[in-house]
Image (cartoon, helix red, strand yellow):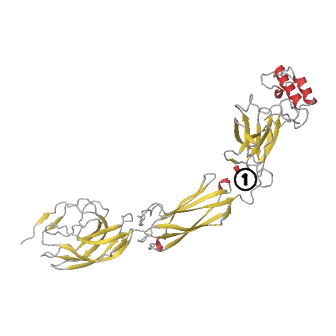
């Protein structure tokens, strides 16, 4: 019988990328050839991402005619079912060469790679002979050999995270060391990354955010084993390099492969963290500050601004600068009674600027605790919190001039009519007031700090207030309400 030429119809077979493209129309000779995978020696357990270089199998020609194709290729799929359908995933192949007579066999080695994101559990390896259709087979059989396998997954965890040195300073190089421990049943593929992240807990600055690839030349991380990892980074010579540094390491950070454990939290236990304390560089100069009342003149008759000048460019945390006043009770309190002794002045605005490389903070006033933008008569303290101010090298304010982190406190008495700042109304003040009385803004001799209500004239209303304070405060340290 003369073989006749026919056109093989389009057949949908899963390709290497897991899709099902239509095969091209291929001219082949008819013949009674039937190639099937007779047996395959796959391992009973396979890990996600595992590569198997040589899985032995045998193809048999069960047909009545010899094959005509000089070579053909078997495909191997992974599936939850024993049949080949659209849910199967291509995982490898096995090449063959030579002609197969009826009943003949062709041994081969399949090379397989289990996808790293495979869900663990019971699966099947499906072996399909001549998957590309290189050899025409009568009846176009779709028989596959289904071999059961159990897919296992790793459970990576970060253990033993340490930082050296443990007590750091700005500018230091920090070495981080840890282990990637595989506590799961399956091996971890040798292709993943650990994410290292370092954040300044005070400033919020992200100092390190990098991925450290695992060196796959060292092989997979088998169940129950670990791999030592390490990296290093330099702390900046700035405020961002000082304070509590929050260090975290997350293994398999991009979820390159599936993880599993009996608790179901295998992808939630991948991070370890620690907090590293960092001090300013030992070479950093001491950070100091000075307070100027108004324009620096001695008068305390009107106080409309306070200026805090730092010796460096600084970062101010919320509440770094406060203006307080004492709380005066009508009678002495017994020791057992604990009541606040100061209150914060409300309506204080703080504006900062950089002048010649130094931070200058100007305090002005509004609201119930201010009259015409000036503080009412009373005792006050400008308090600058040393722990809330940091210089450009991360150093804390030395408010007392020596100890880093100590507060700066500057007290003053505001008393209308006190033109020389001695804390009382004396003859010198009376002479100043008499000379300015009746003067208007723009006149020679007009003194703005004796114009209590700011109406532009040192008038009788100002005189009444001056005389009231003169009667009360004839000696330094006189009482006047806060």
Q: Is residue 50 left or right of residue 225?
A: left
- Corner quadrant of residue 299: top right
Q: Nearer the viewer, residue 75 or 319?
A: 319
- Compared to residue 35, the image places residue 171 above or below, namely above
On the image, the x and y values in percent for residue 198 come to 58, 58
* Quadrant that contains the N terminus: bottom left
Figure check: 12 above or below 32: above
The residue sitting at 36% across, 72% down in the picture is 46
Which residue: 42% across, 71% down? 187
Q: Which residue is mark 1?
A: 396
Q: Is residue 294 visible?
A: no
The quarter of the displayed image where residue 51 is located: bottom left
Q: Position of residue 312 (x, y in %)?
A: 74, 49
Where residue 3 appears, as percent x and y from the top left, is: 10, 70
**Residue 218 seen from this side:** yes
Local crowd at mark 1 within 10 Å, few (<14), some, or many (≥20)? many
How many numbered marks appear? 1
């Amino acid at each position: 019988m003369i073989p006749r030429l026919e056109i093989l119809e389009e057949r949908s077979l899963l390709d290497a990328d897991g899709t099902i493209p239509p095969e091209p129309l291929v001219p082949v000779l008819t013949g009674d050839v039937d190639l099937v995978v007779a047996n395959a020696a796959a391992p009973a357990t396979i890990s996600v991402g595992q590569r198997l270089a040589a899985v032995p199998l045998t193809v048999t020609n069960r047909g009545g005619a010899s094959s005509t194709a000089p070579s053909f290729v078997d495909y191997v799929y992974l599936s939850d079912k024993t049949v080949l359908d659209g849910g199967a995933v291509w995982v490898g192949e096995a090449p063959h060469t030579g002609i197969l007579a009826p009943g003949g066999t062709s041994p081969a080695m399949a090379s397989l790679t289990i996808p790293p994101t495979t869900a663990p559990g019971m699966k099947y390896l499906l072996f399909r002979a001549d998957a590309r259709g290189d050899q025409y087979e009568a009846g176009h059989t779709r028989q596959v050999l289904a071999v059961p396998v159990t897919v296992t997954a790793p459970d990576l965890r970060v253990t033993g995270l340490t930082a050296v040195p443990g007590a750091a300073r700005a500018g230091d190089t920090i070495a981080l060391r840890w282990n990637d421990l595989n506590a799961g049943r399956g091996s971890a593929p040798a292709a993943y990354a650990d994410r290292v992240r370092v954040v300044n807990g005070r400033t919020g600055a992200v100092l390190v955010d990098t991925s450290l690839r695992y060196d796959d030349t060292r092989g997979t991380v088998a169940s129950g084993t670990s791999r030592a990892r390490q990296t290093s980074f330099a702390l900046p010579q700035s405020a961002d390099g000082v304070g509590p540094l929050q260090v975290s390491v997350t293994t398999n950070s991009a979820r390159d492969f599936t993880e599993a454990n009996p608790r179901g939290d295998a992808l939630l236990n991948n991070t370890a963290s620690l907090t590293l304390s960092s001090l300013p560089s030992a070479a950093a100069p001491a950070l100091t500050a000075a307070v100027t009342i108004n324009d620096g003149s001695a008068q305390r008759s009107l106080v409309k601004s306070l200026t805090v000048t730092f010796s460096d460019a600084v970062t101010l945390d919320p509440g770094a600068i406060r203006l307080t006043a004492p709380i005066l009770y009508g009678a002495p309190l017994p020791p057992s009674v604990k009541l606040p002794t100061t209150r914060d002045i409300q309506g204080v605005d703080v504006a900062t600027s950089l002048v010649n490389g130094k931070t200058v903070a100007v305090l002005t006033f509004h609201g119930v605790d201010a009259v015409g933008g000036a503080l009412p008569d009373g005792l006050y303290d400008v308090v600058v919190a040393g722990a809330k101010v940091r210089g450009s090298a991360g150093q804390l304010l030395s408010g007392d001039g020596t100890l880093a982190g100590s507060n700066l406190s500057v007290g003053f008495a505001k008393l209308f009519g006190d033109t020389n700042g001695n804390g009382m109304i004396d003859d010198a003040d009376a002479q100043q007031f008499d000379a300015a009385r009746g003067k208007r803004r723009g006149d020679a001799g007009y003194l703005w700090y004796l114009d209590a209500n700011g109406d532009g004239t040192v008038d009788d209303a100002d005189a009444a207030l001056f005389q009231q304070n003169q009667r009360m405060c004839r000696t330094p340290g006189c009482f006047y309400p806060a």
